[in-house]
Image (cartoon, rainbow, N blue to C red):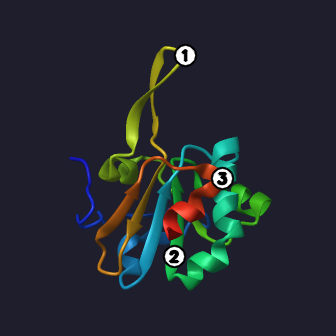
Amino acid sequence: MSLEVGNVAPDFESIDQNGNPIKLSDFKGKKVVLYFYPKDNTPGCTAQACNLRDNYEALQKAGFVILGISSDSAKSHQKFIEKQELPFSLIADEDKSVHEAYGTWVEKSMYGKKYMGTARTTFIIDEQGKIAEIIDKVKTKEHTNQILK
């Protein structure tokens, strides 16, 4: 099942970079930017995270909570946050259950080899917990503009 604008965003429970439990339903009543990215400390993912960091104040003023999610461990997320001074939480989805719920764990291809990986996708979730927008052609260096447009 693929998610569409207007669908209720699947709730999930996982852990953040500090090992604390985190659920989407914790943010009911707030607008959430839930962005799925492939890997901590890689060039595209760093550009995306830093773009959100550099525009964090504008995103907060617009009422958004930012949550990044990848299949990296909480420890990896912690190092990424410290290195890049990220002001938002990153969710560890090592078992890929959240990726599966959102349809972002997909078959990819590089140099003719097929493998499973994360489709870089951002879900904008409204205060009622419904998907208001899906950004599947993420511009890592201009991601805030895509969100605030």
Q: What secondary structure is found at the residue carrying circle 3?
A: helix
Instruction: Examine the image and state in which quarter residue 144 appears.
Output: bottom right
Residue pushed farthest right?
83
Tell me how far mark 3 sits from mark 2, CA to CA. 19 Å
Query: For this view, does 79 lie left or right of residue 138?
Result: right
Q: What secondary structure is found at the residue carrying circle 1?
A: loop
Q: What secondary structure is found at the residue carrying circle 2?
A: strand
At a point 61% along the width and 50% down the height, the residue shown is 140
Q: What residue type is labelled 3?
A: Lys
Q: Position of residue 88 (x, y in %)?
A: 61, 70
| Residue 33 to residue 97: above or below | below
Foreground tag (1 vs 3): 3
Of the numbered discs 3 and 2, the one sitting upstream in the chain is 2
Which labelled disc corresponds to residue 141? 3
Q: How crowded is mark 1: few (under 14 residues within 10 Å), some or many (20 or more)?
A: few
Please give the residue where the numbered disc 1 appears in the rendered image. Answer: 111
Of the numbered discs 1 and 3, the one sitting upstream in the chain is 1
Q: Residues within 10 Å of mark 2 (few under 14, many from 20)?
A: some
Query: For this view, does 131 lie left or right of residue 49?
Result: left
